[in-house]
Image: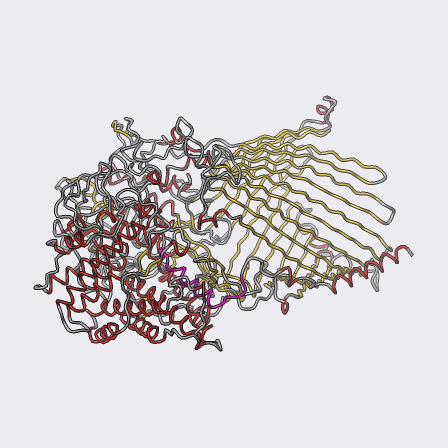
Amino acid sequence: MPGGLNSWQLFSWYGTGASWGHKLDGTEITWWDGVKRKWEANPDNVKSFFRTGNTTTHNVSFSGGGEFGTVRVSLSRSDNKAIVPNSKFDQTTVNVGSNIDISKKIKAEATSSYTRFNRLNTPNIGDNNSWSKFMVYGMSRDYKNIEKDVFRNADGSKNMFNNDTYPMSYPYGGYGKDIYWNTYEKNTDLQRDQLLGSVKLTADVTPWFNMVGRTGIDYNTNEFESKFTPTDPAGLQGEYGLEFNKNYTITSELIGTLHTDRLFTNDLTGSLTLGGSSWYNRYHGSKQWNPGPFGVPFQYFLRNTTAILGSDYNKWLPEEYRQESKINSTYGIIDLGYKDYLFLQITGRNDWSSTLPTATNSFFYPSASLSFVFTEAFGMKSVKSWLDFGKLRVAYAASANGTDPYKTSYVYTAGSFGGSPTRTLQKSLPPLALEPQRSKSLELGVQLGFVNNRIGLDFSYYKINSTSQILSAPLPVSSGVESVTFNTGELQNQGFEFILRGAIVKQNNFSWDMTFNGAHNKNKVISLDEGVETYPLGDVFGITYGAAQQVRVGQNYGTIYGYDYKIHANGKRIVQRIMDADGKKVIGTKYVTTDAPVAIGNSTPKLTGGFSNNIRYKNFSVYALIDYKLGGQIYSTDYAVAMGNGLAPETLKERNGGGLPYTYPDETTANHGVILDGVFEDGSENKDVVNYMFKYASVYGGWSDIHMPRSASVFNNSWAKMRELSLTYTFPKTVANRTKVFQGLSISAIGRDLFYIFTTLPDRLNPEGVNGIGNTQGLQWSAFPGTRTYGFSIKAQL
Amino acid sequence: MKYHKIIYIGFLAAVLFTSSCKNGFEEINKPWDKAVSAPVEQLYNGLVSTMVLGWQEQVTYHSWIYPITQQAMVTSNSGYVMANAASELWSNYYLALGNYRLLEKRIDESPDRDRYKNLLAMAKTVMAYKTIKVSEFFGDMPYSDAGRAATEGSSKYRSKYDTQSEIFKSVIGDLKWAVDNFDTGNDQIAIGSYETFLKGDIAKWVKFANSLRLRYALTISGKDAAYATPVITEALTKPLLVEGDDVAIWPLSLGLTLEGRRWSFNSGLFHRMGTTMWSYMSTSDAKDGSGIFDPRCRIFFEPNNAGQWVAYPQNPTNTTTPEGGLPYHNDRLTSWSKKGDGNIYSPLNYYFAKDQTTIPEPIFTAAEVHLLKAEVFATGLGAAKNMVTAKAEYEKGVTASVNFWTKVAMDSPDWVVAKPSTLPTSAVINTLLTSPKIAFDISNEANALKQIYAQMWIDGFRQPWDVWALKRRTGNLTPMSAVNAAYYDSNFGVYHRFVYPSTEPDYNGANWRDATGNQDLTSKKTWLEK
């Protein structure tokens, strides 16, 4: 930097995507591979990695029946080609099901299905060698995708992009050089076989007592085979891995029900159900890796190596993982109904979970629900003209569950050093005594039907208190551990949901059904554990170097934290001058940031939901679904990176001469100046004209050890999206019959995720590109782009 | 009758089912791949295992600490940020401290506690070394309350920061306890093969603990001479490490493969011999190496791709010829001479990276003990000033260092090119000790002291963390290039410490703010710095 400072001391460390160079004006320059090309705009460079994906699904099903019962058979197959190269999956499923009447009183139902799933590679998201990160962090605007044609040398070996081959140096370092090789030459195949089967026997023992016995099995095996092509021409520097696991779950249940349509009086119906069940799961697998070098070139098997193992033999040993757990239960259900308008259900259940200590592994939880059809109870003939149906319901339900296996003993990490065993504490402090995680929910609801039930409204309010939750929170590692897991967390969820349905037109040739639904939910932390201050939900680069979502006791989920502008008593942002290395000359200004991370936004939406219309005219029908989200903010790391690296179009304003007159240290001048809006510590207005870099690179960035006002990259994220649009034509029966093959035939054209009707985000940021689908709804970084899907479907009935 | 049977069977099944609700649960849920106990000797060996250098730590030595201490120079910026090493060192230390607290507690609660004194003294010594190493990087830090979450619970989830002065004094106290309590008697419980560090050699443990005490007392002598002086005096009366005692992570005896070292050479990428070190090892810039008088030069460094000895300017200018080549690339494992056409400056000797199984990670060499004693006698701190004795210790220190590093090269099976076959002759040592820059300046105490520090600086070539502390505690009396010094001042002179890892402001915020006043900067000097 002019003045002797290094750029990282002012703007921290940016990625190879930094694009502050001169205008892309078509000048011919020598590229890093030594070839002359035009220095020009490359509007499609982000797209250059992707391809059009597709999915095809075929399904054939048959069913038939006779005196003995019914049989169903179906076969379905789907194939998917991903939008990233060299990634695909397919799935084939065979289903067989039958109901057999063994006698008048005993019936049997048996179902089984077998699924074969094959997958080649999953897209690599977020790490240094992924296109998703490269797009926003590694790729400069002048980027031309040269790698895709040269990542493999002519002899099949890997192009290392090193200085021997490219004396001018490959400019994208670890962010770009391995993307294509890893995509095409580091292949992992998954083959999953899954068998699902169940048998159910029902016996109507007497007119007032029946029994049901059921047992089901889910058995699946997964085989992962990784073949990493040798990077050398001789075919020796390859790798090979093999992983197998099997997952076995069996459930059994025996239920007896006493029931009567006349309990004490004609108006009261009742039933009592008692049952017991058992759930058992065992998951076991192992994997082994051959990191090479190979002995036999280009062959992939575990022992194919010439490596001398020595003390690093550990990486050759197979890894093993397993989980085993069991839950036994008994339960009872009482159902009472009075005159078709008052219904009461009471349940009680006791579980025994193998994952909890002996003292607490037996736990009971009840529930009760009452519903009241008041239109039926009160006759309400006077309002019948507009209110056809009205039901109120109130429900209380408790539930409880255990945890993951093997948590009941205090364990140490075992290792070895110098040929002798070592023991160390676990990095996470485990809870001292485990008890079941419980929750209690209260739900109030109303269901109304108007105008001959052509308009319906379903509304419910719920509040769920979850206690004894097993949660983990980080501790400063100076405590000797990295985190603590505790069993005392209490969370509260409350919110409402509604569905409004309308049959607007209901005629033989024309119908129009409409549904509008919405939901709002709030999560609150009631308590954590002694000594635990915050519960982290997620972060991008941590709260200090990026932004994070975390909650404290008494707070709702959703708050986004990061460093922010420091505000003067007069309400304006505080700026400070940046001096050169000698501390004598002013070289810029920057915003002063808060002393610690503060709340910079909240991601909780006010309302989410959908609006659907289904219109049928004769044999045509149109279905349109719009999803929406109103309210809730996101911190967009993509935006922060694009602004800080000069990738966002906004950063061109001054570079295009739209700034204030500015004089460079070499006395050249340009309209490249900006004044940061703010005041100095003493309250005086900042009038310093500084280079535009101080407006962008010092305010925005991804990972940054220079604190930046992160609220500059926080946006309201409200949107509405055309989620699905489909048009279906059902051939008239006469036409179908004329084929002499089909009894029914319909064709549809379908489009999904077509476009946003509106979005409040700038620069076409992906409103749904948030990190994950859990509690971290307010952070966005390096996601793959949204995809639009078009398709068609043919349904034929034989 | 048929239906009644079904009812009876169902009822019986339900009874059997509920009566066996917990059957086999304990067996199912028994940990199958984790230890449920932690014997003290295994906890101790776990502590020792944390003495191995971290990967990020090493790449940071190559990328940052070498240019800061001027033991070497970088020809470009590798992009590695200090924060990575800071985080790694911090975690390594505090996770070890947590285990040490547990070990201490177990011994304290043991009926055999008096028979575990040796074990406790060993653990205290290991932790003393680790504590000071980390404090020298960061300055004030959580210590007396730290590492206690697992043993003392939620009241110790967040710990206050102790000052660097308090930490040094506490550690020096622990070392005194260790030196005074190591016991060669038979009643102590020996932990046999679990003592992987010094193989149960109690006499050597005493020397190691006492030598550390001497080093740390001298480290703070510039700041608190009144405290340090009697410690130095006492340390000189107790056994110290001597030739052959060099304490290090010796991978061969531990069966280790130090992969992190090779990785850090290849990742740091840009470190080369700098002119400051070159000026202490060669009388001229002759590219054929004819001016080299210090045998360690050919051990620490090697010629460029063209076989020439060329040092990169410690303070380069715009006219400095840029460096290329890949002298640390794995290609050299099979093709030793292939350093890349662009490699025009002398790299660090790639045998340090190639050999992962015999070349040690030094912790305390006998040479350093001599040089520390030379410092004591030259300054008169803790002993009567005696320049003759200082000279003798200085020369023993230089000789011990040259012999140590020569032996390292001799013992490395990977070392082939320019491998020394014998220890240097007395003539070679004499040439070194009488060369103008090295010959002890007995008549000029200030200059002599700088010579002593220069030799600690050379001997500690593979202990740049200790050399950085030396540079700071002496007020930059280690060798520094005077040419274009402004470059150093703005690029490397600004670094005085590491910034605390982000987990501190994030999760120990109140204590961190108390300690830093929100000004957690690399430019802030720690207490020990002059």
Give percent across and percent down for residue A127.
42, 44
In the foreground, A784 or A566:
A784
Whether residue B427 appears in this view of the structure is: yes
Give percent across and percent down for residue A483.
45, 62
Q: Residue at x 20, y 76 (%)?
A: B226
> Left or right: A116 with respect to B79?
right
Q: Quadrant of residue B478?
A: bottom left
Residue found farthest to the left: B443
> Left or right: A265 with respect to B118?
right
The quarter of the rendered structure image containing the C terminus of chain A is top right
In the foreground, A134 or A23:
A134
Decide whether residue A17 is among the magenta residues: no
Q: Residue at x 70, y 48 (%)?
A: A217
Q: Quadrant of residue B165?
A: bottom left
Q: Is residue A655 above or below residue B131?
A: above
Q: Magenta span covers which residues? A: B35-53
Q: Is residue B199 above or below residue B275?
A: below
Whether residue A465 appears in this view of the structure is: no
> Left or right: B317 with respect to A322?
left
Decide whether residue B39 is among the magenta residues: yes
In the foreground, B144 or B314:
B314
Q: Is residue A635 above or below residue A442?
A: above
Residue found farthest to the right: B1
> Left or right: A594 with respect to B16?
left
Give percent across and percent down for residue A505.
64, 39
Give percent across and percent down for residue A164.
30, 33
